[in-house]
Every structure is written in structure tokens, then in C-alpha cells.
Image: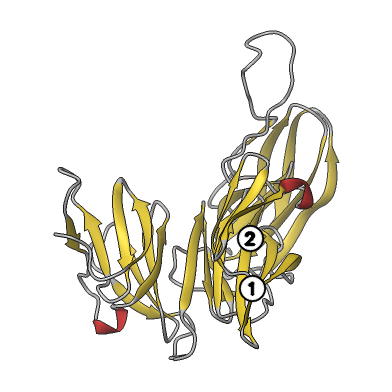
Amino acid sequence: MGIFPYVSGFSEWRGNLYAATLGGGLFKLDSAGRSNWSSFNNGLSSLSANINAVAGNNNVLIAGTLANRLYDRQAATDGVWDERFITGNNSPGDGVTDIVAAHDTLFMATYNLFYYSTDDGLTWHESGHTPRSTYTILLNAKQAVLMARNTFSNGINKTGFYYIKKDSLQQSVVPFSNVDNHFTYRMEILGDKLWDAGFFGLYYMSLSNLPGITAADAKDPVAGGGGDPGAVHYPFTVGQVYPNPLADYGRLDISLDTAKTITAFITDVSGKLVSMPANGLALPKGKATLSFRMGNVSSGVYFLRLSINDKIITRKIVHINR
């Protein structure tokens, strides 16, 4: 069986390949012969026939439709789609244009807005104060989410390029380029360049124009004496929060190959800032312990996000208010 009628996107999820279509919902590639596609629409209504984007993390697969801010969510343990609205009500003029996954966070762009979710797509939070567009493409970078927001005005396509740092999701997006007579279909970071597949061909921009932003899978090599000259190791390690669950005070062990400056902040599941245990804290080479206090906050799940060497490390906190 083939895919019908038009493919709008692909996603590899938990070892299988899935295709989103405009008119036929979702399809799954046969894992045995890799030659047939089968419908993957269990739980979907006709409202979800037009799927424009699909992406997932280890726990969930998310598909976005072209209207009503309607999206579809399937947990790895369920096998059935759950149709949901981002804001809890219809918005006929606003559909999902792209979705990307970055570790514990999912990012979603619609025609008008930009959202993120830290609870596997159960709830979404508006972020970025983005300008409106006719179509937005997202790219997951190591330190930020990049977006190409296409607009059409007075008969001319224009694309504005922006980024938002993952440790500053409540800030405004940062513009870094604007191109007239252009429409972006897809972006990718390869080597030292940001590549753009546009209406008239393939374009690139040097990453030197985006200081501090690298590919999502980029490593942090550190030069060292002896051993394999081609070996790469990480310049720091970060332990787990302990104790966990915790009632008030918590600790996090950090080991640094070189002296570094760190920032740490704690948020709730909605992304609201709870506290900032460290802001530009200089740590020497070697082992250190970051101590923090939850204070008088309600019991529940929180996230400690550590910014170090242009990398965001997230640790889950279970807080019990005694």
C-alpha cells in the first residue's frame, strides 16, 4: 500500500518511520519488508485528515493539523491517538506548520504563534513574542530554536529568520536575517553553515553570523595532551539532583575540565521561573556542588536547567511540600 494523497512530512519514532499527509492522516512504514505503508490513524477523526507536521521524543509522537490549533498526541504506551486543541478552543485560522523535539522539550509553530511543551505535549505554552507569518519552519539547534517565518505581502514572498535561546523561552525572538522574494521550505545545520532550502534553490549562511549556535548534535571537544589525537571528550559532567524527591534543599554535583561560568534556574512544568540558584557563577576547574532551595512552593514536578558552555542540561525535581 502506498501513501495517499500528498506527503507533508516524515518522522522516525521509536525505530519506525511515519509519514504525515495532506488528506490521509498518518501512515507507518512496514518494519519487516520496508516496502508497504499502512494507515496509522487509530483514534483520529476527519478533523485530522490534513496533517502538516509530525515529530516525537522517546515518550510521545505529536502531529499537527492545518486548522483550529488542533494537534494529535500518541503516547508510546497507548497505541491510540488523542485529538487536542492547543488553547482548549477552536481557532479556525491558525494551523500547525512545524514541530521539533529537543530532549525533554517539544516546540511547535503555528501560522501566528510559537509554543513549547515540557510534559510530552499534554500542555503547550506560548513563547517568543513572534511576528505573524503565513508559514513557519523550525530548526532544533544545540542552544536555540531557529525559525524561518514566511510572509506574503503585496505579491512578494518574504522570509524573516529568528532564533530564541532555550534558556530564555520567555524572551522575545531575536532576528538575524530578512530576505525578500524568498520562501523557506526547510533549514539544516551542516558543518559551519546554516543551510536553507528555498523557493529558488539552496542557500547557506556562515554560523559566524550566529555566534554561540551550533548543530543539535555538536560535541564540545577539549584539547588535551597524550592519548588518541582524534579523541573527543566532554569538558564537564553533571550528576543527578539529590535527594529526589526532596522537601526543601537539593544538591547537584558538577565536574569541570576547565574553569567555567554557569547559570542555573528552576521552572515549573509551565515554564514559569521559580528561582535562580546561580546567575553567572564562576566555578574553578574540578568538582563542585551546586546547592539550591525550593522554598515555599507547592508539591509537584519542577525542572532545574543548568546553562554551561552554551549547553542546557535539564534535571527533573520532584518536590514534596511538608
Q: Is residue 296 visible?
A: no
Give whichever of discs 2 and 1 has the lower sequence position.
1
Which residue is rendered at x = 58% and y = 64% of the image? 321
Dot 2: what SS? Answer: strand
Residue wearing tag 2: 146
Classify 167 as above or below 50: above
Classify 30 as above or below 220: below
Quadrant (top left, top right, bottom left, bottom right) of the C terminus: bottom right
Q: Is residue 143 visible?
A: yes
Classify 187 as above or below 237: below
Percent of width and height locating residue 124: 51, 73
Label 2 vs label 1, nearer the camera = 2
Quadrant (top left, top right, bottom left, bottom right) of the N terminus: bottom left
CA neighbours of label 2 inside 10 A, class few (<14), some (14 to 19), many (20+) = many
Which residue is rendered at x = 24% and y = 62% of the image? 27
Which residue is rendered at x = 69% and y = 63% of the image? 164
Q: Which amino acid type corresponds to the residue marked 1 in the rendered image?
A: Ser
Q: Nearer the viewer, residue 62 or 312?
A: 62
Residue wearing tag 1: 127
Which residue is rendered at x = 34% and y = 52% of the image? 13
With 224 as the anchor, is 280 left or right in this view? right
Percent of width and height locating residue 166: 66, 58
Dot 1: what SS? Answer: loop
Q: CA distance from mark 2 to mark 1?
A: 13 Å
Q: Which amino acid type corresponds to the residue marked 2 in the rendered image?
A: Leu
Percent of width and height locating residue 276: 76, 58
With 272 as the anchor, is 46 left or right in this view? left
